[in-house]
Image (spheres, grey):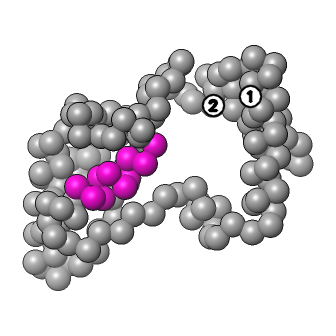
Amino acid sequence: PLNKERIEKLCQMLKKRNKRGKNFSIIVVAEGTQLEWKAILKPSLHIARNKGPDRLGGIGQVIGELIAGKTGLDTRVSSLDYIQRGGTPVAYDRSLATAFGVKAVELVKEKKYGEMVALKGNRITSTLLEKVEGGIKIVNPSVYKIAEIFFS
């Protein structure tokens, strides 16, 4: 879980790195991250779900703003949605997004909740979320400790 102490520790680590001439860092925050201090979040970020853990849409931006405010360092936030695919959306991306939207509306009309729209081959389809979620994925604490040692 992400808490105030962890953010403070992260900010201290970033400041130390900056003093040593390491003026870059990459921090990854999952929208499924668990916060012990949800009070700081804008209510619009919290996305409650019927099944599985809640999501925090836009959590990367919130954490980025916290880091910038606490460190004074230039902070940029990138969302993986387009980067993961490879860049700025093109016509195919826009038409695919439209097709996904149409399928999502069809699912709602059919009262098929708990499903996600997917592209299988060249076909727009849907699949149960419980089949793709795989439960909550937590970073192994020992891996986190090793990362702290090497990157602080």
Residue 75 is situated, as x and y percent measured from the top left of the image, at 29, 69
Q: Is residue 102 left or right of residue 66?
A: right
Q: Residue furthest right?
A: 122
Q: Is residue 24 left or right of residue 57?
A: left
Task: Relative to 117, say whether 21 is above or below.
Answer: below
Say how many tags the image has: 2
Q: Would you say the magenta stretch is mainly helix, strand or loop? A: helix
- The residue shown at (53%, 18%) is 51
Using the image, tell me which numbered label, if any, was put on residue 132.
2
Disc 2 packing (10 Å; few <14; some 14–19; many ≥20): few
For the record, the magenta segment spans 57-66
Task: Please check the rendered image and state whether residue 76 is part of the magenta-colored stretch, yes or no.
Answer: no
Q: What is the quadrant of the N terminus in the image?
A: top left
- The residue shown at (74%, 24%) is 108
Task: Relative to 24, say whether 50 is above or below.
Answer: above
Q: Amino acid at mark 1?
A: Thr
Q: Secondary structure at mark 2?
A: helix
Disc 1 packing (10 Å; few <14; some 14–19; many ≥20): few
- Residue 61 appears in the figure: yes
Task: Relative to 151, say whether 122 is above or below.
Answer: above
Task: Relative to 120, say whether 62 is above or below.
Answer: below
Name the image quarter holding residue 110: top right
Q: Is residue 149 left or right of residue 108?
A: left
Q: What is the quadrant of the C terminus in the image?
A: bottom left
Residue beneath disc 1: 127
Mark 1 in CB contact with mark 2 (< 8 angstroms): yes
Residue 128 is situated, as x and y percent measured from the top left of the image, at 69, 24
Task: Please check the rendered image and state whether residue 62 is part of the magenta-colored stretch, yes or no.
Answer: yes
Q: Secondary structure at mark 1?
A: strand
